[in-house]
Amino acid sequence: MSRLLVMLATMLLYACSDDAPADKDRQRHTIDVEVRPYAAWFQEEPISSFTRGFPEDYKDENDKEYKTFADMYGDEGNFKYQTDLIHATIDMYFTRTGSGTYTPRDPQFTQVYYSNQSKRWGTPFEIESYAYYLYGFMPEEMAEEGSSITSTEFENGAVLTLTKMSTITPNDVCVVVAAGSGNATGPSTGFAVGKFKYQTGGASDQNFIYLLFDHLYASMRFNFSVANSYNNLRTIKLKKLQLLSESMKKYVNATVTLEATNDGTSPITNVTFNSDDSYPLLDTRNNTNDGILFDNSDNPVELTTTPSSFLGCFLPGSGNEFILKSTYDVYDKAGNLIRENCKASNRLVLSDISSTITFGRGKMLAIELTVNPTYLYMLSDPDLDNPTITVN
């Protein structure tokens, strides 16, 4: 199981105390800071054997499990076909004691980005040997018109604003609910949900930043498989998957209120979503680019009798009906392309699928989808055995 190791190449302006000399007199040291982000697994219904534990799980003091992003979204994770999820960028605010309002234009802001070359997240960021209160979200790409953070006392919490987010996305939209320092074996004593303090280490130390994330959206897990009888005759390659709604706007703004806690409870005290009047409705017509969960014609997913899973996240409480559109190619077992760019639409009424789940943030509904046609739409040459006719 691959392990997510996120490296920040960081310049540390090291000082012995807060009243150290001016910057020009400080010794500069280059240290490695490794960031280890985890996220809580969705509360899934129905509970599936596909939901599994991983060797690198982290449990908080309430025994709530958090999983590495590699285990959830990496090449061998639950949603390995949507590997763009692991390439997300984390937007972070390194705040200090006191009040303020910051945007990405301020020096308190930095981005932790994923490098395809090094297979790690990293950023050059210049920090001093102070205590910071870390707030942030991922993926950065979700807030198309940026973010901001404000607080009267950052040590006690903050309000994070995210602007123009897609209401349907393959991305697991998360905010930081815990931050702290640690070493290679784990976080420092006292690290817990609701605490945001990160104390930088000395220049000779290997510094680790531990982050826990929690979800802002609800989600559906689509498990695609092919019926045994049809799988003996045809190969289905999924090229594109879209999730749409006739009642949802394309974008939404979010305001997340975070209050520091000392008992391990969630610091998310309120999440408010609102749509600007200028935001359009989702486009449900064919050939639209809205609501794309997967799109890879060059490397389509070959569906088999074993389920292949895809994640679709959506604005919680936004609607009960969705349209799932699939685009696929059909091959015979000799590898001949029989039908290209076939399209299928399935209307999903969530209340019919599950009458018990409440689709709030962090909830997941598992939906089983089986390719099982009642007849062959088109024969191929290998289907013809040239049978003879005999007279009885």
Image: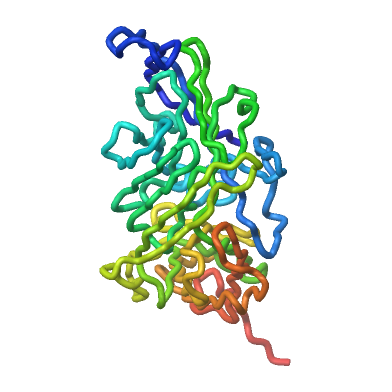
Q: Where residue 117 sits: x, y (%)? A: 40, 31
* 63 sits to left or right of 206: right
**Observer-nearest of 142 and 192:** 192
Query: In the rendered image of this protein, does residue 322 appear above or below residue 116?
Result: below
Q: Where residue 250 sits: x, y (%)? A: 35, 67
Quarter in which the N terminus is drawn: top right
**Observer-nearest of 127 and 244:** 127
Q: Where residue 220 sits: x, y (%)? A: 55, 63
Confirm whether residue 281 shows in the render.
Answer: yes
User: Residue at the location (34% across, 76% down)?
Assistant: 285
Identify the residue at the far bottom of this view.
392
Query: In the rendered image of this protein, does residue 13 appear above or below residue 75?
Result: above
**Observer-nearest of 115 and 154:** 154
Q: Quarter of the image holding residue 275?
A: bottom left
Quarter in which the C terminus is drawn: bottom right
* 289 sits to left or right of 206: left
* 47 sits to left or right of 219: right
**Observer-nearest of 213 and 243:** 213
